[in-house]
Amino acid sequence: MSDVVSLLAQIEDTGRDSRGPGYQRPGFSSTERELREWFLAEADARGMDTEVDANGITWAWATSPGENAVVTGSHLDSVPGGGAFDGPLGVASALAAFDELKSSGALDRAQRPLALAVFPEEEGSRFGVACLGSRLITGAIDADRALGLKDANADTLADVATGYGLDPNRIGEDQSRLAGIGSFIELHVEQGIGLAGTDEPVAIGSSIIGHGRWHFAFSGQGNHAGTTPMSHRADPVVAASRVIGDIPVLAAAADARAVATVGRTLIHPGGTNVIASSMSFWLDIRHADDAVVTRVLEAISARAKEHATDTGAEVSISQESYSPTTFFTAELNERLRSVLPTAPMLPSGAGHDAGILAPHVPSAMLYVRNPTGVSHAPEEACEDDDARVGVQALAAVLERELGAEAGSGSSAGSAADSSGGGR
Ligand SMILES: [Zn+2]
C-alpha cells in the first residue's frame, strides 16, 4: 500500500486551477466526484466496504459496520485557488493510518468498528454554506433550506444532488447514523502559524472559534456611465465599496482579535460603461467570543445602512451561516493527550466538519504543521516527513480508541462517552 505522500501524489493533478496555481475542487462538482471515486477505489483496494449516504458523505468500513464506531476522515473539495492539503491530507492520512493499523495487527485486536469518512462541500465554495455535509447529517441546516441553496449558475442543491446520484427527498438529518459514531477524529493541515517554527509537528485541537457568513446586497439605479451626472446617481458599487473600506477599522474597534473579511463580491450587470444596478459582498467574521462577532456585525451593518442612505442605494443583509465557538470533546482530548503527550493544544480560526459534529458526537482534531502558515492559497504547505508523523499520530490515536493497543485487553473509550463538545 502507498504511504501518505504517494497517496497525495495520486491526486495532485486532479482539479488544478486553470487560471493560476492551486486547485478548483468545488463541492458536488465532477472534480469532487472524481476525487471521491479515487477514495472509493483506494478503500476498495484495501478490502473496505464503501457506501455514499443520503447526504453525499462517503463511508468506508475498515471493519464490520457497527455501533460506537471510531471514525476518521476529512474532505476533498477546495476553496477557489486552494492548496493541496486542506482536506486531502486528512483523507490520505486516514487511508495510510488504516494501512498502519492493518500491518501492525491492531485492526485484528480492535474492540470497536472503524470507518473512514469523506464529507462533501466542506468549504461551502459552491453553495455558500460551509461544512454542508456535516450540517445536513446533524440537522444544523434544515433540509428544505439546503435544497433551495443556489450556486453561481442558479442551480439548486436539489438539482445538483440529483446529478450527483443523491435523492433530494432523502437529504437531511440522520440521527441513526450519527448515533453509531462513538468518536470522530479529523486530521487536518494546520491553517495558521501555531506550529511553524516549533519542534512539534502535530497539535491537538482545543476549539474552533465562532465564525459566520453574511450576504450584503446593495441595490441602486442602473444607468448610463456617460449621461448620468454624478449628482443623479444611486450607485450601489460606491456604497458597498465604502463599507468594505471601513471594515478593518470597525473590526479593530470591536476587538483587537476580531477578524472580518470580504473575499467575494458580485457586481450586476458588470459593464465598464454601466452604472451597476446591484452589488453584493459576502462578509466572514470570526472571534472566540460570540458577543464580539455580534458587535462586529452590528457595527458593519449600521455603517452599511449609512453608506447606502448617503448614496441613494438600499441594502439588505442576510445570514448565510453561523457557528458559535465549539470546544472539542474533553474526555476524547484527554485520551489523545495520553497518546501524544508533547502535542500542544491549538484553537482553530478555521471551521471544520469535526466542529459541526462535536455537539452531537465525541469529536477531536489533529493538526499537522504547515511551514508557511498559509492556507486557502497555493502556498499552503506540509513537509513529507511531517505528513508521515501525522499518520503515525493518527494511527496511535485510533489504536487507543479502538482498544487495540498491543498487550492491552482493556477497552479504550467508553460507549457511554457522549458528553459532546457543546459550547
Ligand atoms: Zn479543510
Image (cartoon, grey):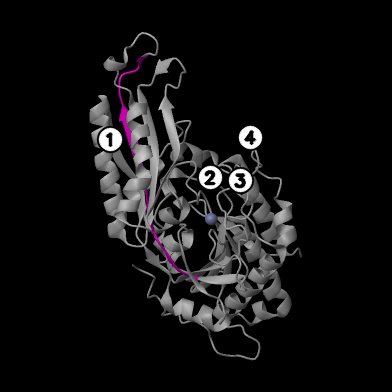
**Please, what secondary structure does the residue beneath circle 2 have?**
loop
Query: Residue 22 at what x, y percent from top left?
Result: 63, 44
Task: Check disc 1 and report the residue beneath it.
Answer: 316
Q: Position of residue 11 (x, y in %)?
A: 70, 50
**Based on the displayed image, in which of its 4 quarters is residue 115 positioned?**
bottom right
Residue beneath label 2, please?
A: 27
374 vs 114, nearest the viewer = 374
Say which residue label 4 marks.
19
* Residue under pointer 3: 33
Question: Image quarter for residue 374?
Answer: bottom right
Q: Which comes before the other along the chain, label 2 or label 4?
A: 4
Mark 1 or mark 2, which is nearer to you? 1
Q: Earlier in the sequence, mark 1 or mark 2?
A: 2
| Distance CA(mark 1)–CA(mark 3) | 35 Å
Q: Is residue 318 visible?
A: yes
- Residue 299 spot, x, y in % from top left: 27, 46
Q: Which mark is residue 130?
A: none
Query: Mark 4: which amino acid?
Result: Arg
Q: Earlier in the sequence, mark 4 or mark 3?
A: 4
Identify the mark nearer the N-term, 3 or 2.
2
Q: Which residues fall within the magenta stretch? A: 205-223
Q: Quadrant of the N terminus?
A: bottom right
346 vs 229: above or below? below
In what element is the residue under mark 3?
Answer: helix
Q: For the residue labelled by badge 1, is the local secondary structure a helix, a strand or a loop?
A: strand
Relative placement, left or right, of 264 versus 103 is: left
